[in-house]
Amino acid sequence: MVCLRFLLCFLLVNSAYVTIVSHDGRTITIDGHRRVLLSGSIHYPRSTPEPDLIKKGKEGDLDAIETYVFCNVHEPTHRQYNFSGKFDLIRFLKTIQDEGLYGVLRIGPYACAEWNYGTTNKAFMVILLDEMQNFTTMIVDMVKKENLFASQGDPIILAQGIDIIFIHLVVCANMAQSLDVGVPWIMCQQNDAPQPMLNTCNGFYCDNFIPNIPNSPKMWTENWKGWFKQWGCKNPHRIFARFFQRGGTFNNYYMYNGSANFDRTAGGPYIITSYDYDVPLDEYGNLNQPKYGHLKQLHDVFHSMEKTLTYGNISTIDFGNSSSLFFRNGNETSDATITFQGKSYVVPAWSFSILPDCKNEAYNSAKITTQTSMMVKKPNEAEDSPSTLKWSWRPENMDNFLLKGKGESTKRQLFDQKVVSNDQWYITTIKFKKRDPFLGKSMSLRVNSTAHVIYAFVNGQHIGNQHAENGNFHYVFEKDVKFKSGRNVISLLSIIVGLANYGAFFESKPAGNTGLISIIGRNGDETIVKDLSAHTWSYKTVESVPFKRTMTWYKATFKAPLGNNPVVIDLLGLGKGTAWVNGNNIGRYWPAFISSENGCSAKCNYRGAYHAEKCLTNCGEPTQRWYHVPRSFLNAEGDNTLVFFEEMGGNPSLVSFQTTRVESVCANVYEKNIIELSCDMKSISAIKFASFINPDGNCGTFEKGTCESSNNTVDILTQECVGKEKRSICLYGKFWSTGLQWCC
């Protein structure tokens, strides 16, 4: 009898920590309560340090943090695993738990994510189903062991076992269900996702998405808050709207913080090192204002309307005091005035307004009532001469492959470089007799290449180089060359700038010099082609990135910048290569790759449907100039070491370390609205401009309008704001005569 009582007590105590996650046709339910859930993607292999980022996500009124599990960082070699350092998945999930947020775990193993092979490893591509089951089961067992699924207590409320991999959906769904995680499984971009998987939407817009079964809620697993960037392209920007107006109740921002593709992880190909994505927390972890604050205001409104948004038929059910109202203006050019219950509301073009009580507008997507932060980069104050680093250097030793024709392995065929993923030398020799008819002709070397960058040498002499452009990764490289009688060495360096991560049969797309390689001889109308593709080729895998006669290793020491502001390194002046700080690979750099001069505008017009070529900046500038150096990579005391391998012969004297911080803020505030001004935990030092009624211009270029308040607004704001870390401002009534109301 005593034992029975003890057992009953134990079961009751244990069940108190269990969270029941389910769903119906409207929303995800948690312990029986319908929820509006706002989530943000933060990828632990990309983002450091996570605690601060996750805390900022919570302060931005998120409910959950979503992450992929990155198969090829955890299993770089078949059945050899790595969960240490920044790859510590369990630590990341526990950090989410410590902040009181939910987790959304997208196990993969395929994830796309602009990452080499879409985060899969080579074994996965060969033995798809076996490897998927092995990896997914291992991750689930790890998470279960730590009691991190909601069915065990906290914090993971949703799981995803496979992304858009196109095949074996029923098998994958059955395998996922057999793991018994106790929370719903989701499957994105699969209109035929089998039950009980919940199919979801990824995209710029998902307001028209309809789940494939009536009992599935309308879920947006990837709300693309910006867009990734490729070498040679401009910076994209965007905002969003509409999803919740049409019945959506789960939204995940992809990304919320993107950080960077450290090491050689960026896929694509041609994805740059930065994964900033124009999201609420920028690459360095700073608040991207006004986007962060504008979305926080939206989150606050949605949470206040949770009951209305999650119950009943959107168009016909009236919940009395819980009713809410959306106004949407789909016109791309004209504002609209809407009269409802005797009151007029102005809805700007291509925007929506939310009236939680059906009377007062709490939010409009086009009316930005949060500050804009102007970020600057400051010199490294820890150095006496911060703009000049003292360099040591040595050239890359390439005699073995340029002059001697020696590699590490040989084959009588051309090698597909994606098997090794690193950069690769292709080396062969060819002999010409003194009277060979080829030697008397005009000659060229022709390479049908799928390398992203190719450098070509003949007998140690650099004859030319070429890189893929405009998304065309199949091209012909051809340069004139003079061969000598006797032995000639042909050396081709093939550089890969990210492996494919998306599309049908992406894993089979060739990489490197896999096409026809030939010597072309011409004499008048006569052309002779000598095919070298079946020659014996030697291969040498480049562990870092080498090449070119001017290719050189550089090394310098530096002091860690003072303070806590994020650290960046300015690589303007360099050509192309890879950089390391204290042995940490901070990624590929290519500041010599300049974006085109055309396509940008001084002011972005967000009206109308978004696409990746809309609202661009950075025309005529390096694709990426500044690179994030997480403070976790640095020694706070003593020297730090910078090493980079420069392929194209840039100028290292311009390289410098800097910190990024908020320099100034500016904002518009509308009547009957509140705005909070803050300077990133620093005191406000001065008010440079202030104007009431109808000021004109944009942030940084404001000017007074035709009508102005009789009060000296600069003096008022100076008195109330200077010396304070933050200040909230309300405008009310006829503010041009009564001034400001200050809010606690």
Image (tube, rainbow, N blue to C red):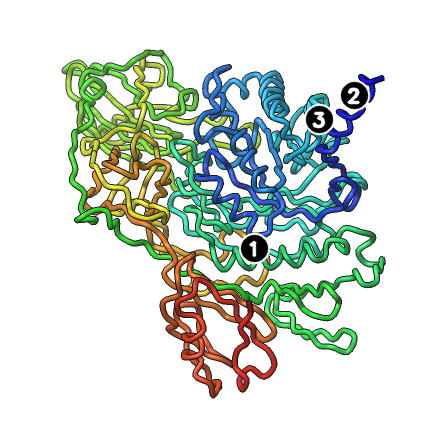
Task: Name the residue rendered at 47%, 29% in the picture.
Answer: 87
Question: Which residue is outermost to the front?
Answer: 2
The image's mark for residue 610 is: 1
Report helix, strand or loop for mark 2.
helix
The residue depicted at 24 percent of the width and 50 percent of the height is 381
Q: Is residue 647 visible?
A: no
> In which image quadrant can residue 610 be found?
bottom right
Kind of residue sitting beneath label 1:
Tyr
Q: Earlier in the sequence, mark 1 or mark 3?
A: 3
Tag 1 and tag 3, C-beta contact below 8 Å? no
> CA–CA distance between discs 1 and 3?
33 Å
Q: Is residue 648 visible?
A: yes
Q: Determine crowd level at label 1: few under 14, some 14-19, many 20+ residues with C-alpha closer than 10 A.
A: some
Measured Cα–Cα span from mark 2 to mark 1? 59 Å
Total count of labels? 3
Nearer to the camera, 380 or 265? 380
Query: Residue at image x 65%, y 34%?
Result: 154
Amino acid found under the numbered disc labelled 3 = Ala
The residue type indicated by label 2 comes to Leu
Q: Which residue is mark 2?
A: 7
**Residue named by callout 3:** 173
Tell me the element at label 1. Answer: loop
Where's residue 325, x and y in %? Answer: 74, 64
Q: Quadrant of residue 714?
A: bottom left
Tell us which disc is closer to us: 1 or 3: 3
